[in-house]
Amino acid sequence: ASAAEIVSGAIQDLDRGVIIGGDRTFGKGLVQNVEDLPFNTALKFTVAKYYTPSGRCIQGINYKEGGGRNVEDVRFQSEKIAEKDRQTFYTKTGRIVKDGGGIAVDYKVEAPKASALEITLLRSDLMGEFASLWSRKHELTNNFEVDDATYREFQDFVEQKRKSGDLKLE
């Protein structure tokens, strides 16, 4: 299970904070062990599930063993926990929370949309490269803020990379 899911579930259940995000967490709530086997193989098996302080199970998928006479029927099967099958629990102060399928956010916010330029700059690592060059000439302080001069210096750096063919802007 994700440590973030376990901690956010505890924060929510104990009413110590609110969970803000884009959507419900993935719902990986299984505790698993791995045993080495011969021939450079291993067996991964589930030994427990994670629960929040209110008793909610984080796991979002039910796994069950197949059975039957056809080859397709003997394989393990998985199904996402349906909304109608989610149980209701209460936080310390009485807020309703549900199990099965990760941790639902308390306040939903949309992720900001990045422009094509931002994506190009992030993928090219020009910001990291500029920061490395900048730090050779400047001292980073706790109250650092990008001022107009630093921003112009970055723009010039990007333009140099574009002119030299190291960066293609469309």
Image (tube, rainbow, N blue to C red):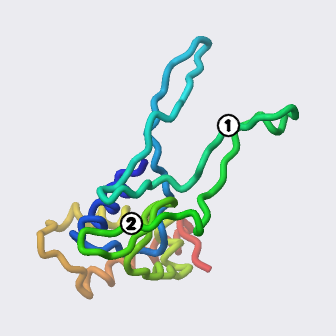
Residues marked 1 and 2 touching at CB (< 8 Å): no
Residue 31: percent from the left, percent from the top?
43, 39
Pick the residue in front: 66 or 5.
66
Asked whether residue 126 is in view, the answer is no
Asked whether residue 21 is in view, the answer is yes
Left or right: where 68 falls relative to 51: right
Q: Quarter-wise, where is residue 55 in the image?
A: bottom left
Secondary structure of the residue carrying tag 2 is strand
Disc 2 marks a residue whose amino acid type is Phe
Other-residue count near label 1 (Cα within 10 Å), few / some / many at <14 / 14–19 / ≥20: few
Q: Residue at x 48, y 77 (%)?
A: 118
Disc 1 marks a residue whose amino acid type is Glu
Pick the residue in front: 109 or 140.
109
Q: Which residue is mark 2?
A: 89
Other-residue count near label 2 (Cα within 10 Å), few / some / many at <14 / 14–19 / ≥20: some
Residue 60: percent from the left, percent from the top?
53, 56
Count of marks overlaid on the render: 2
View extreme (left): residue:
142
Secondary structure of the residue carrying tag 1 is loop
Left or right: where 81 falls relative to 22: right
What's the mark number on residue 11?
none
